[in-house]
Amino acid sequence: MSKNVLVLGEAREGELRNVSFEAIAAAKQIAGGGTITGLLIGDSVENLAQEMVQYGADRVITVEHADLKQYTSDGYSQAFMAVYEQESPDAVVMGHTALGKDLSPKIASKLGSGLISDVTAIEGEGDDAEFIRPIYSGKAFEKVKNKEGLLFFTIRPNNIEPLEKDGSRSGDVSSVSVEITNLRSIIADVVRKASEGVDLSEAKVIVAGGRGVKSEDGFKPLEELAELLGGAVGASRGACDADYCDYSLQIGQTGKVVTPDLYIAIGISGAIQHMAGMSNSKIIVAINKDPEANIFKVADYGIVGDLFEVMPILIEEVKKLKSTQTV
């Protein structure tokens, strides 16, 4: 049976996040030929609508309001519910991002529906689709199937491949007017502490440091390597607790969960809380002077050695490789 699917897109600083396109691909897989409707909520999002269409959405609805410039669960839930009641979709897809993790349970509660969260893969199509998600901090996986009612799930970024962009596609874009009322909180100001560059949660390459880097200056080689590889810098909680870097870079059970194509762990021992946030990375490279470090149990490649000796050599080799590719 075909399903009409509502996909919540996410915009940041005037651009759509990649997870928006991944969510469209997930929606296509379970729609069975039904309509994919994109939803964009914010202050100035109408100009982003056609990009959702180019990545596979059939139509897009925008909700714009001055009180939606910054995310709040009250404001976004009011906007979302207005569109949901108008569209009555059979399924809803969101990214398992900071926004999605906060908003999805609130919406599910309002709708009295189930919620399949943090989906990393979908097996089968249409009504036969089964959703794979990690449990026990990533130590195991379970398959979940929606038996009846609204199908509502969130997808982990960097796990479902987006459809190829088709610049020739066009679709209907409409807007819904919503009165945002009774906000219990407002965002007065946003202070960004994360470093400029690639978004950590969507990075294809992450270079992460632990207590072994020994200082804030110890992160500078990691930043250089990340820049060379077009990636982002992350950290273990131990490095954050030691004030080597900001907590916005923390990866782990109490930080960000990431699944890059390449994860380079430098001076990270491999506490279970950290590995819960990165163990599903496609390729893991570990550099640690302790051959018994727990991180080597999940690493595809390991270098046993002093990171302060290994890093300059690694950076130099990457520079050589990049220079040969540009010739």
Image (cartoon, rainbow, N blue to C red):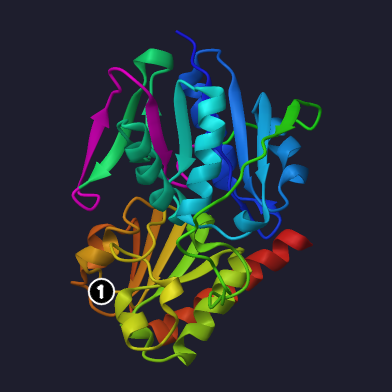
The residue at the point 56 percent across, 42 percent down is 79
For mark 1, does the 10 Å Cα neighbourhood hold few (<14), some (14 to 19), or many (20 or more) residues? many
The residue at the point 46 percent across, 31 percent down is 92
**Image quadrant of residue 162?**
top right
Q: Nearer the viewer, residue 56 or 99?
A: 99
Residue at the farthest top position: 1
In reply to whether residue 147 is colored magenta, the answer given is yes
Q: Which of 316 and 248 is in front in this view?
A: 248
Q: Nearer the viewer, residue 58 or 66?
A: 66
Q: Where is residue 312 in the image (x, y as percent from the top left)?
A: 52, 82
Q: Is residue 80 above or below residue 251?
A: above
Q: Can residue 261 be seen in this view?
A: no
The residue at the point 59 percent across, 39 percent down is 21
Q: Is residue 175 above or below residue 274?
A: above
Question: Mark 1 highlights which residue?
Answer: 269
Q: Where is residue 288 in the image (x, y as percent from the top left)?
A: 31, 76
Quadrant holding the C terminus: bottom right
Which segment is the magenta one? 136-160
Q: Is residue 146 above or below residue 246?
A: above
The residue at the point 49 percent across, 30 percent down is 26
Q: Is residue 244 left or right of residue 19?
A: left
Q: Where is residue 307 in the image (x, y as percent from the top left)?
A: 39, 82
Q: Where is residue 240 in the image (x, y as percent from the top left)?
A: 36, 81
Q: In this view, does 280 lie to the left or right of 229?
A: left
Quadrant holding the N terminus: top left
The local secondary structure at tag 1 comes to: loop
How many numbered discs sit on the rendered protein? 1
